[in-house]
Amino acid sequence: MKKRLLLTRRLPDEIHRRAARDYDAVLNPEDKLYSTEELVALSAKFDAFLICLTDKLPRSAIERLDPRLKVISTFSVGYEHVDALAARAHGIPVGNAPNGVTIATAEIAMLLMLGATRRAPEGERMIAAREWTGWTPMQLLGRRLDGKRLGIFGYGKIGQAVARRARAFDMEIHYHSRSRRPASEEQGAIYHPTLEGLLAHSDVLSINAPSSPETRHIIDARRLSLLPKGAVVINTARGDLVADGDLIDALKSGQVGYAGLDVFEGEPKHHPGYLELDNVFLLPHMGTSAIEARIEMGNEALDNIDACFAGRKLPHGVN
């Protein structure tokens, strides 16, 4: 008899077909959101959950999951929405999808970087409002990327992918992560043992670190003040790494010249102050919104579930 699998969100057709082939799969073609309480109740009817970052499974929920549920796999690289340590204590392996997100997210980081430094959002708004009266020599002057120092906070797979793309624009790469990477991964990037040291050398700051209690609001007023005046801040990681009010103040004062943001704390809500500014480029969490990425993510999430029921270690286990 096939194991019962719940897919909590609508996913690409290729992933639906694989899930239906290998499992007694319950899909979600209407893409309705499940509440935490609904997931707890459904755990008595399913052997596996394939969840998304919108599905919240804190410790209080994990402790009430039915023993029937044997594995949780998330359609994301981040797993802060599920208490993996509590799941481990209850014998439930948790897996993520760490590779499919890399290229697509790095591309969005470059889109935000280019759009911010060349003031593309302002130009688009000018056209849409029919306010453009013609070319002038000093209109919407931005900055080139070549020769600029790109500071990457978080030099994992995505951070390194951003670095590879930025090198094509002749940027100088600097980074900070919890430990120094081997030379084969650095590829000439300059390591800074502290975040503060990185910020002082970042004409453009790309945030690519994971969300955790330690990184919440780590980009605050004090650290923003360490950036070169007029620096550009790009965030494709998680919204809660940035103290929104502090970034908005820095954008108003000119300490930060432009911000390109794909993620927000408490999304889909976002700080209303951003909408009052011209010097922001805002996207609705599109980092992995490429069909190739979503298919690869779905396959990685299913690989974890396959491994669990085959008695193997999860290839992308996080606990």
Image (cartoon, rainbow, N blue to C red):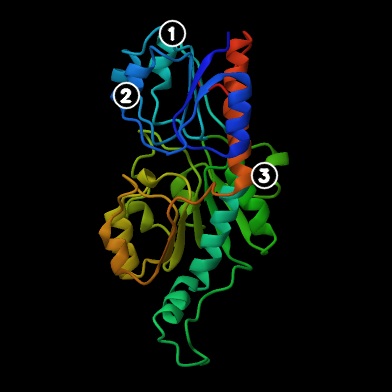
The residue mark sitting in front, 1 or 3, is: 1
From the top left corner, tell me how far across and down residue 191 is, in percent: 59, 45
Which residue is at a point 38% across and 45% down the rendered structure image? 241
Q: Quadrant of residue 294?
A: top right
From the top left corner, tell me how far across and down residue 148 is, in percent: 58, 65
Question: Which label belongs to residue 38?
Answer: 2
Question: Which label belongs to residue 201?
Answer: none
> Closer to the camera, 227 or 244?
244
> Closer to the camera, 209 or 228?
209
- 73 horizontally vs 103: left or right: left
From the top left corner, tell me how far across and down residue 10 is, in percent: 48, 37
Q: Quadrant of residue 36?
A: top left
Distance (Cα) linking label 2 and label 1: 15 Å
> Closer to the camera, 1 or 285?
1
Type of amino acid at the residue the image marks with label 1: Arg
Type of amino acid at the residue the image marks with label 2: Glu
Please tell me whether residue 119 is drawn above or below residue 155 in the rendered image: below
The earlier-in-sequence mark between 1 and 3 is: 1
Q: Would you say the residues marked 1 and 3 are in contact, meaning their CB atoms lie under 8 Å apart?
A: no
Which residue is at a point 40% across and 86% down the rendered structure image? 131
The earlier-in-sequence mark between 3 and 2 is: 2
Which residue is at a point 52% across and 73% down the rendered structure image? 118
Which residue is at a point 41% across and 13% down the rendered structure image? 45
- 98 horizontally vs 39: left or right: right
The earlier-in-sequence mark between 2 and 1 is: 2
Type of amino acid at the residue the image marks with label 3: Glu
What residue is shown with label 3?
186
Q: Would you say the residues marked 3 and 2 are in contact, meaning their CB atoms lie under 8 Å apart?
A: no
Count of numbered circles on the image: 3
